[in-house]
Amino acid sequence: MPPAGVAAPLEVGVTEKIFLSATGQPVVALRDLSFSVAQGEFACLFGPSGCGKTTTLRILLGLDRDFSGSYRLPGGEDARIAAVFQEPTLLPWRTVEQNVRLVLPKARRDADLDGLFEALGLAGMRALYPGELSLGLARRVALARAFAVEPTVLFLDEPFVSLDERTAQRLRTLLMSVWSARPTTALMVTHNLHEAMVLSDRIVVLSPRPGHVAGLFDIRLPRENRSPRVISDLMRSFHEKFPGHGTP
Ligand SMILES: Nc1ncnc2c1ncn2[C@@H]1O[C@H](COP(=O)(O)OP(=O)(O)OP(=O)(O)O)[C@@H](O)[C@H]1O
């Protein structure tokens, strides 16, 4: 394989991931899961409950090393990885500003983050503490923290669940405006097919467990052209290509 630079794709080749159930029975979560995400592409990992989406992210984040196979991150050894989870996981005794700056390397602790706070609608909230924020605002701070490190790869695990649809929609728009300013190779787990259509360049569709790639759905359309009509056409094509997937 050529050396992995920042321009290299995210490559996933998990041969097998087995858990042991409480009774000691093997649970094969993933088998022959293989896909890649091109540099600067935003991909969604979509599939039925229990098919191994979170397991895949945990492996790619280096949180689970007990699997067979391999993967390669953009940036290789020097990859700067950022992750956004369902829980914003902010330190309650630190301000919004401090929570974001904490993740920066010492040399960049004083970096100018005005543009980032502004873009995420947090400019007036930098001195607030997490306890003063709604869940939607706390998730914005989690996004700011992720983008502050200027990651070479970004992982998101259902960052917009349990928000009312208006707030979720606002956050998707904010995510896209920050991401578009500096397109970063991104992989986001979602249960929400509509969300995947709005946000991603490519949907990686997983089979039921043991998870492997059931197929790819490419959306090569500029996001500003994805009107409700276009999204509903895309949803129709998706259902034709993957009958039974993505129906509530
Ligand atoms: N620590 C664990 N011990 C045993 N089994 C596990 C463990 N973690 C996950 N599993 C099993 O592995 C499979 C994949 O789980 P995972 O959470 O990755 O699925 P998922 O696609 O993210 O599900 P969901 O969409 O419901 O969040 C499931 O069958 C799950 O029960």
Image: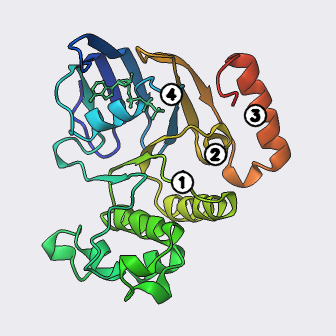
For the residues bearing labels 2 and 1, Cβ distance under 8 angstroms: yes
Mark 4: few, some, or many residues within 10 Å (few <14, many ≥20)?
few
As displayed, is residue 223 above or below residue 231?
below
Disc 1: CA contacts within 10 A as few (<14), some (14-19) or many (>=20): many
For the residues bearing labels 4 and 1, Cβ distance under 8 angstroms: no
Numbered disc in front, either 4 or 1: 4
For mark 3, give the secondary structure.
helix
Check disc 1 and give the amino acid type. Phe
Residue sitting nearer the eye, 247 or 149? 247
Q: Which residue is mark 2?
A: 195
For marks 4 and 2 on the same chain, the one whose residue lies earlier in the sequence: 4
Please identify, in this view, whether the residue under mark 2 or under mark 3 is nearer the observer.
2
Query: What residue is pinned by disc 3?
Result: 234
Earlier-in-chain disc, 4 versus 1:
4
Of 117 and 28, the residue lying toward us = 28
Q: Which quarter of the figure has residue 127?
A: bottom left
Does the beta carbon at disc 4 come under 8 Å from ligand 1?
Answer: yes
N-term-proximal mark, 2 vs 1 = 1
Position of 128 relative to 20 (above/below): below
Say the numbered circle drawn on residue 160. Answer: 1
Q: Position of residue 69 (x, y in %)?
A: 23, 18
Residue 46, given in percent of the width and then of the height, sits at: 54, 31
Which kind of residue does numbered mark 2 sit on? Glu
Name the mark nearer the viewer: 2 or 1.
1
The CA distance from mark 2 to mark 3 is 12 Å
| Residue shown at 64% from the left, 59% from the top | 164
**x 40%, y 26%: residue:** 52
Task: Give the label on residue 49, or none.
Answer: 4
